Image (spheres, rainbow, N blue to C red):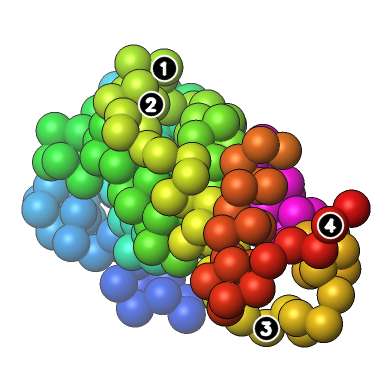
Amino acid sequence: MIITEIKKEKGRRKSRQVFLDGRYALSLAAELAEKEGLQVGQELSRERLKALADREQLDRCLEVARLLLRYRPRSQAELRQRLAQRGFASTIVEAALRKLREQDQVDDAAFARFWRENREAFSPRSLRLTRLELKRKGVAEDMIDLAVAGMDDGESAYRAARGKAAKLPRADYAAFRRRLGGYLHRRGFSYTVAEKTIEKLWQENGELPAEE
């Protein structure tokens, strides 16, 4: 097969359309086409054509993955799912993930630490719920164990509820307890931890729970 034309792709200045024997064959990034030294009149074997197509797909897959990682760190399982949804073949996705691992751009252990720290700083959860969230993200159990080591549900519940408690009316302990309890339960805290946290926050204002 002979390259009969190489032209800019409409609407994509940095892409080149490659024509073989007068027919459109594939699109490549301009940088890749230049790096590979493609020229009109050059002969391309089917193997070379497939290798070029795979390289282009890998480069595009990496571009999408890095764009996703700009928003926040992600687990490998998350990236695998998102890239598959974009239509990339599994072999291309795995090659992209391998390259990202080699470049330390994706690391499930680091992602698990980030997830815990982010939750603790902005939206504390219970140890159980944090573990569940990481499991849903596809993080391995041993990495989850390391990431959540040292978490204290009592401290987390207090941090989670402190801001919410400040906004609740203090005229009625039962209502305060019900609303704050629901808030803590939705974040995975047990009944016992929630009750202790509610009483602590109520008493911090010099008030005691009403006798039931």
Q: Give the residue displayed 49% in from the left and 35% down from the top.
A: 127
Is 185 a magenta residue? yes
Q: Are marks 2 and 3 in contact (CB under 8 Å)?
A: no
Amino acid type assigned to the residue bearing label 1 in the image? Glu
**Residue underneath mark 4:** 211
**Residue underneath mark 3:** 167
Q: Residues within 10 Å of mark 1 (few under 14, many from 20)?
A: few
Above or below residue 140? Residue 150 is below
Numbered tag placed on residue 141 in the rendering:
1
Q: Nearer the viewer, residue 81 or 33?
A: 81
Q: Are marks 1 and 2 in contact (CB under 8 Å)?
A: yes
Whichever of callouts 3 and 4 sits on the residue coming sooner in the sequence is: 3
Mark 1 lies on a secondary structure that is helix
**Residue underneath mark 2:** 144
Mark 1–mark 4 Cα distance, whole angstroms, equals: 44 Å
Q: Residues within 10 Å of mark 3 (few under 14, many from 20)?
A: few
Q: Position of residue 192 (x, y in %)?
A: 66, 36
* Image depth: mark 2 or mark 3 in front: 3
Magenta stretch: helix, strand or loop mostly? helix
Above or below residue 6? Residue 41 is above
* Image depth: mark 1 or mark 4 in front: 4
Q: Are marks 3 and 1 in contact (CB under 8 Å)?
A: no
Q: Nearer the viewer, residue 188 or 10?
A: 188
Mark 3–mark 4 Cα distance, whole angstroms, equals: 23 Å
Whichever of callouts 1 and 4 sits on the residue coming sooner in the sequence is: 1
Q: Position of residue 25 (x, y in %)?
A: 45, 46
Mark 2–mark 3 Cα distance, whole angstroms, equals: 34 Å
Q: Are marks 1 and 4 in contact (CB under 8 Å)?
A: no
Read off the magenta span: 180-190
Amino acid type assigned to the residue bearing label 4 in the image? Glu
Q: Give the residue displayed 34% in from the left and 78% down from the top.
A: 13
Is 206 a magenta residue? no
